Amino acid sequence: MKNNVFVTTDVGGTFTDLVYLSEDPATGRQQLKTAKTDTTPPNFEQGVLKVMEKAGVSGEEIQVMAHGTTVVINALTERKGATTALITTQGFRDVLEIGRGNRPDFFNLNYQKPEPYIPRYLRFEVDERIDCHGQVERPLDSTHLPQILDTMRNEGVKAIAICLLSSYRNPEHEISLASAIETLSEPGEFELICSHQVSREWREYERTSTTALSAYVQPVAARYLSELDTGLKQKNFDGRLYIMQSNCGVDTLASAKQVPITMVESGPASGIWGAAELGKIIDEPNIIALDIGGTTAKCSLIHNGEVTVTSDYYIERSPRSAGYPIMVPVVDLVEIGNGGGSIAWLDEFNKLHVGPQSAGALPGPVAYGRGGSEPTTTDANLMLGRINPDYFCGGELTADMTAVERSMNRLGQQMGMTPADIARGIVRIANNNMVNALKLVSVNRGHDPRDFTMVAFGGGGAMHACALAAELGIKKVVIPATASVFSAWGMMMSDIRRDRLQTFLCSWDLNAIDAISHEMENLYRSLEQEFIDDELPRDKTEFQFYGRFRYVNQEHSIEIQLSYPLSQSHLEPVIARFNEAYEQEYSYRLDNDIELVGLHLVGKADVGKVKLARQAQTGRLLSEAIKGERMVDFAEDGRHQAVIYEGELLEPGMTFPGPAIIEQTGTTIVVHPQQEVQVDEYANIVINLTPGGEQQ
Amino acid sequence: MKTQDPFTLEIIQNSLRAISDEMFSTIGKTAMSPIIYEVLDMATAITDADGELASAGSGIPAFVGALDKSVRAILDKYPDDAIREGDIYITNDPFYGGVTHLNDVVLIKPVFADGERIAWVVNIAHWNDVGGKSPGSMSVDANEIYQEGIRIPAVKLFSNDELITSVMDMLLANSRMPDFLEGDLWAQISALRVGNKRIKALAGKYGTATFRDAIQGYLDFGELMAARTLKALPEGEYTLSEPQDDGSELSVTIQVKAGQLIIDLTQAPDQSDSPINISRDGTLLACQMALMGLIGDREMANGGCFRVMQVKTRPGSLYDVKAPGACGIYFETMIRLNDLIWRALAENMSEHLPAGNFSSICATIMGGTHPDTGKHYSIIEPEIGGWGGGPGGDGANAMFCAMHGDTFNCPAEVAETRYGVTVGQMALNPEDGGAGEFRGGKGIVIDYKIRSDNSFVTCAYTRSVVPPWGLKEGHNGTANRIEVIRDDGSSERYAMATGINVNTGDTVRVITANGAGYGKPENRSQAAIEQDLKNGYVTVEYARSVYGFNQSGSR
């Protein structure tokens, strides 16, 4: 009998990762392999094929491959999408440029708004109107469509976004307009996307922006996915290919091609999903996931095993810029410009800052010796003895410590401090930035971090996690066995997941229950049919409804699970659950009536996940895993002689105290004094912290 | 390692900002009134033990420097030994540290560590109704503050962590919306408690001495930054007089001397019988806002910045109202003052400020019966408009005015459902104006089609007659106004009006100004004009007549 082989590949900004899991169905014996190669822009699929070669994985043995890619976010941030046009309702073509009128950097009187992806001359209007109840107020007039298309052709437009007012209630005009365009154009002449295919939620600016950005990346993403498909087929792959989405699930290739914008945050989403799934395996339902990469740190909160998926997502938003909304289901996360490659710099008043500028992969940290001269967080970690200069990047690089010291010294001279002082300052300030981000996902949302376990991954997660956890009063840190390729590992744990969000404002009472049931049925039937069309049988699928509720006249809504089909006996329990959830988040409850703002349907289908097996013990002694000792600077916790462990030689059941350093191929774990390490039965590194930290 | 190294100080300073932000999000999440959590009509702050602003959390610039003044009012009123741990004070009275108008209620709590006062936490939020002659407490025809609601003159609300119920009862009895009042009050209290807890933990971790040093270092740094900004300005004295829409004239004299910015407003008109006055504290706030606009850095706004500024006012004037002058509609006076100072600085001293913008709150209030639900609806919104061109580029299109910041407008799809009006268009203002080497940004045109009879519109717009000011020979912008287009096609124009009757089929058209230009129009690049024409930001006729544009590129 053939082995079950599940492979995931993840194209990141710097590296392309692979995780391979094969299971012998007869014995249940598993083999887990991981591999890493450089990412290969602009032909990202080349890196995927290369990493398969490196891992010795052949196409024909793979039954399922899940794939994650940064191609969408790259096209957006590097402005490398297609020339795109917009068609919208008469009177609303400027919505994309007006935005919401906000100015986050409010004392900057020279503030410039983010420039729209579609310039005004490529934004066109049609006479039509659907009212807020979804009734046609003015019929669609497509008389001018041929001229509009001619103008588009002359301007080299390749993709068209259609977003009409109130189409979240009734998309019929968008559908008619799209078919009229298809009639009037050559097949393949334009990529076409309507707002109702991307979002069924109100707020015309957010929906228009989402549709515009989706159209903008459509040709690039479609080309990439086709090339990947072809490349894999040439490698004799004939298994099922799934694409990672931002909602923590995967989807079929065809579906991903249709609305590629949903891939926008797939990398972080799979890591966060991995943390949630790992939590299920090791019985930790409450998790703060921390992913520190080269350029940014991302964090997200998992409560009772549930990740939060919202459509409140932006790119390029910061205290300096309003950014661009993308109203698709994205895992709820906070991202800050603080990663291993973040550059430390002095402002004109000699104050030290870390990030958000990053040295990226090129030139990379000073220690790479590829021409970087400004010190980064990674350089500071080397300087402090946390990273082993002789085992840099898993031994693949020799750290240029002379250059690192020189770069620290340059800052040190300006501040009247030693290079070691500067390195310590860099780590402390980077940690402080990350603590503030972690507070945003926890305390600022009514959660006490002491009730959570931190799961840290990405190249830099393990280096900082223990200090951050101590600061927040978190009692346990888990570094997954596959920390350095954790996004790829998380994908292996994913189901097919489709989120359907529908704005449906309605009172929550007996009078409305029929209308709500009707709307739920429509949503359910159409998603169920999609799954059937994709040959995902009913016994492999599950559906869950949520309602977004709020007190009448308030703005903030909270999601509550709904039973389907709905009946009047559900009214009261939902109100009770809403009040409870509201009080948890907002600290009080009201007597007011509640109303439904929208429905959220999640459909999942199992793609044949493999259940993770426990790791065997070989009886190796802990002393065999010890590489030596060295002096390590733990910043606020002082300098200590620390024992250095070879991560690959640790096995389940081993325990030892900090101060310690665990060196693995893709990451280094820094264990502070008074912390205890324990290797669990899946070879995850668990660090227990002495209770303490900030009082909540 | 508990030394006072620069990184520890930096981390404490970062933490103070994070605490202000956490208090801000606490109120935003727990407040009951939409004006608080949607319009962000609120702010939080931490001051040092003596009331100097250490850190502010705010969604809008107009509240950043507000709260140190409230703390000072407590310090003025109560002897040091009367201020104890477990106290919370409350004020809303502009004559007692309330700064703006009676609707804005300030809560103030001293933070103690090891028995000594190390800081204050403060917050302010707009309450829906604090009594007075009209619902909502702000009335355009109030002529004494007594008509604007209950005056809370910096009194104690909590003692020993216990609520003083007699004060609370008086507050509740004076509001038309006591439930909202109570909800909003508790939101503010929970934010104070969070701030108190966090500051104690911070001081506990690093020691109170280090904590104090960090705040003082932060304030000194703010001063250093402000001083550097002033150094870039030429020394001298400049006076600007500007005619106003109502025919009056406002003037300011600004002096830059020995590292100080002295703003002399003593020539201001006498205080008004209408509720457009500002307290001296409110005037300080407007001046500080102008100063921060020069400095330009939101993160660094603290009391240290304000040390380099002196403001002179005349008691009994518009900018230093004496009791019982009314202040309910202070905001247009404040934005006019802020803009006046900005203009004086831009025309005479600074090379970094942009030309004038639409510069009005453009407060728009509409109400009537919701045609779908039969319930009363009311829209209360500030509008967005065009900003001026500046040394760096064209002015921004459609943005909130200088007093507002991270404020969001209401989407048409939400407005249609919530208010039962039809939004006919939401477009950039197509009028020409604001030409310059860098042209003004576009204002907006919004059409609200009324769907029920006996609805009303009230508006308070300035810059409706006297347009946004051009800079360095840039042209002026256009005018803010409301047009009511009747069902029969006739139309009326308004800027300051109360209770205009509108009926089904009428359209209320909000038009906000295009910002003014910066630099001579003839210096605008050919490529920029071609882009403007292609995008329809200017008309061909305008490009020809003002920019001297022709297709061949020779001008």
Image (tube, coloured by chain):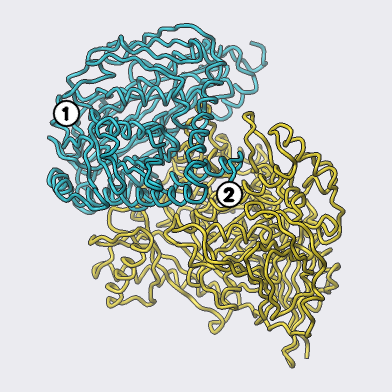
User: In this view of the protein, which residue sits in the foreground, A318 or A381?
Assistant: A381
Question: Residue B133's x, y, as percent?
Answer: 12, 35
Image colour for chain B is cyan
Kindly indicate the quadrant of the structure image that contains residue A415: top right
Tell me which residue sits at (52%, 20%) in the image.
Answer: B353
Q: Position of residue B124 (x, y in %)?
A: 32, 40
Query: Alpha carbon of mark 2 to alpha carbon of mark 1: how far?
Result: 47 Å
Amino acid at pointer 2: Asn
Figure chain in yellow: A
On the image, numbered disc 2 is attached to which residue? A432
Secondary-structure class at tag 2 = helix
Q: Is residue B460 left or right of residue A306?
A: left
Please tell me the numbered disc located at residue B53. none
For the residue pair A391 and A671, the one nearer the viewer reads as A671
Q: Position of residue B486 (x, y in %)?
A: 24, 32
Subunit of mark 2? A
Q: Nearer the viewer, residue A87 or B497?
A: B497
Mark 1: secondary structure? helix
